[in-house]
């Protein structure tokens, strides 16, 4: 299993979509803090 961590800045919606497209990722797994704005 290949695992890669990426740190990026910008509007999260745009950066996530652009990165998934660029990597041609089969799956995206995200985690966050329960109090964060990410849903």
Image (spheres, rainbow, N blue to C red):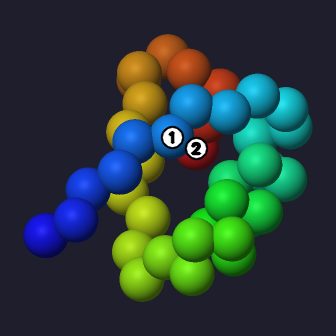
Q: Is residue 15 left or right of residue 37?
A: right
Q: Is residue 2 above or below residue 11?
A: below
Q: Is residue 7 above or below residue 5?
A: above
Which residue is label 2 attached to?
A: 39
Q: CA distance from mark 2 to mark 1?
A: 19 Å
Image coords of residue 32 (percent x, y): 43, 30
Residue marked by disc 1: 6
Crowd band around label 1 with a 10 angstrom C-alpha radius: few (<14), some (14–19), many (20+): few
Which element is circle 2 on? loop
Horizontal side of 38 relative to 33 (left or right) equals right
Q: Residue at x 68, y 33 (%)?
A: 8
**Count of residue discs:** 2
Query: Does the CB distance between marks 2 and 1 fall below 8 Å?
Result: no
Whole-percent x, y for residue 2 in the image: 22, 65
Dot 2: within a 10 Å radius of its alpha carbon, few (fewer than 14), some, or many (20 or more) residues? few
Single out the mark in the foreground, 2 or 1.
1
Q: Please identify the residue farthest to the top as the structure is shown.
A: 35
Q: Going 51% across and 40% down the picture, which residue do you hit?
A: 6
**Horizontal side of residue 29 vs 17, given as left or right:** left
Pick out the residue farthest to the left: 1
Q: Nearer the viewer, residue 30 or 1?
A: 1
Q: Residue at x 40, y 74 (%)?
A: 27
Label 1's element?
Answer: loop
Image disc number at residue 32: none
Q: Quadrant of the N terminus?
A: bottom left
Give coordinates of residue 29: x percent, y percent.
37, 57
């Amino acid at each position: 299993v290949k695992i890669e961590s990426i740190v990026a800045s910008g509007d999260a919606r745009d950066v996530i979509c652009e990165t998934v497209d660029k990597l041609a990722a089969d799956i995206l797994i995200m985690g966050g803090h329960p109090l964060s704005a990410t849903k």
